[in-house]
Amino acid sequence: MVSMSLTRRPRFRALLCALLLTLPAAGTVFAQASPDPAGIATGDKTSVTDAGGGSFVVAEPTDKSAPDYAEKKKAYDEFQASAQKEPLAMKLADGLGHVKIATNTAWTLNTGYLVLFMQAGFALLTCGLVRKKNAGHLMMLNFAAYVFAFLAYYAVGFAFQFGAVALNAAPANIGGTPTLNRFLLGSGLWGFLGGKGFFLTGPAYDASANTMMLFQVVFMETAGYIIVGSICERITFGAFLLCELFVGALLYPIFGNWVWGGGWMSQLGASMGLGHGYVDFAGSSVVHAVGGFCAMALAIVLGPREGKYGPDGKPVAFPAHNLVFVVAGTFILLFGWMGFNPGSTLGATDLRISVVAVNTNLAAVAGSASALLVWYWIFGKPDITMACNGMLAGLVAITAPCAFVGPTAAVVIGAIAGAIVCGGVLLNERILKIDDPCGAISVHGFCGWFGAVALGIFADGTYGAGWNGIGAASYLGAAGRGVTGLLHGDASQFLVQLGGATLCAVYAFGFTFLVFKAVNAVKSMRVSREVEIEGLDVPEFGMEAYPEGSEQVSLA
Amino acid sequence: MKLVKCIVREGKVEETTDALKRLDVSGLTVTHVGGRGRGRNPTAVFRCSEYEIPYRPEMMIDMVVADYMVDDVVRTVIETARTGEKGDGRVFVIPVEEAYSIRTRAGGPD
């Protein structure tokens, strides 16, 4: 979405005007803004751009008082004249525009499938990290998270998040979803909630909108699985389903609207002059910090697992039951992340994808190396589960800045995230005494916050000209300058990132805590002490994860 | 007729059963078990909390032998499975009242 925000909003509007006023035949899609379920009217000459995003179709200037009106009018007249002389070129341009949208749709859907596969990675990782007696419980949580959060997002989440995306952040790369154009709360630069596309009917029964839906729903699912890592081994299945519906319908879509749906945080550049507005390329904050701080609130509401803290308050180790799952799951997540970050351009015609992919890998290995070495230094032995957490920490932290920084900055960001995750685990386990079985709070919450802030520090201005409608012509006095961080001269971008990431943490933690403190007061969200000691598999789900030979003594 | 029950190191079990086979022990059963002795088991660290591994993996060998073989069997197990370090294991000899073969319906240690 993200990158659609790259959509150079003013240019898009100008295009819209041009279509409405002068190209009625070609512009029917936009003019009537009717949904296009078959995808046969999406993508025409107006989608054709040069490599830098400059439009092939020249729009008619409407503001006669603008200083460059004469120049623009001349370019427009010349375009119209050549269009009349070369009708075949116009027809070819229509075909080219459709192929461009098709290419980007294929890219977006396929990277979405990679993100979907991260479900398998999360299931293996979290299952491996807990005790054998709860393995079936973990499998069930990961499975049900996908199913129920998906339905909640289909019903209302997508509309809340993207119901107004065409207004301020139209995803031009995949056709612009012109029918999703109304805020339910707020308007203009201060939108708070989208209002079109409930149950994917009417305006959302559209090829472009469904591309968006597939890609976005798997991102929401990621936030949905994150919480599993913190609340497992003690939550009842019913309470868990409620958590997933809450994440899929409310918690995630609301913040997502503010940042990716054209909502108020993304427009802070236009409305308050703060950099390019709040920028989060692929979701360090929108996905990971929301999931991580939601997980933190839930872990506090639930309390630590039975026996996690001894009578003296010292933490007791509950060792992972299957390191093979942990490592396999981590590498599946790394693989899925190759969809998560590069896919967030929503277009293969945006060649920045290669830089994004390399940055993502670099941060992953730097985070892993740093967590491994920090742990080696503190405890005298390298710990594979911390190495895996470190890899995910690097990935989470690079997710927001991956498109805006260079490879060296990616290594630095990843390495810092690896250290943060070690500190976070120690802080939660020993000082705050928040029981987080899989480290989700440290990995996704703390490193997600850091990633969004790191964007405001390290963004080098080489990418994102026109992001959120800011600086399409020039920024900080340079043409083509994109999102720029503190180290490269834009302090306002740093401020908006710091404030936005912190707001994200407060929002996700506070909203979740209030809702589930109340839920827990009505009906306890925890299984009974006896069930917890026996393991949740049989009492809650009537099955053992490893029935063959499960009577054997655990040897480790 | 006696049941000889031995707990030996994982790394010694095959050598021991090979030696027993040469003694013409008619059959034996091997089980993975976990256990501990007087000393401390090795310490592990999981995510910043240290813990003593509660049970060390060991192998248990069970066999029923005729009384005249017991001395040879026990001596063979001790000689083969011994390293001289702590944790070499134990041998127990327990009287058995009756034993049968299910296939042949025959009684006795064989």
Image: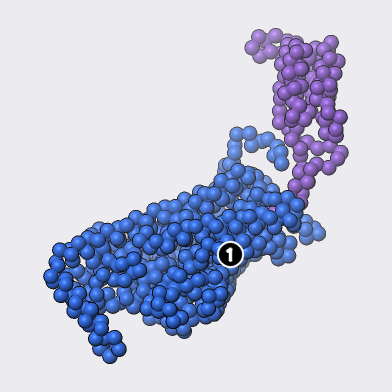
Residue type, numbered disc 1: Ile
As drawn, the residue found furthest toward the bottom would be A65
From the viewer's perspective, is A408 left or right of B91?
A: left
**Residue plotted at (33% across, 63% down):** A174
Rendering coords of residue A445 (x, y %): 59, 65
Identify the subunit bearing mark 1: A
Residue bearing mark 1: A413
- Inspect this view and state whether residue A192 appears: no
Q: Quadrant of residue A477?
A: bottom left
Q: Is residue A384 above or below residue A363?
A: above
From the viewer's perspective, is A445 left or right of A358?
A: right
Q: Secondary structure at mark 1?
A: helix
Which chain comes out purple in the rendered image?
Answer: B
Rendering coords of residue B18 (x, y %): 73, 18
**Quick one: label 1, few (<14), some, or many (20+) residues within 10 Å?**
many
The colour one sees for chain A in the rendered image is blue
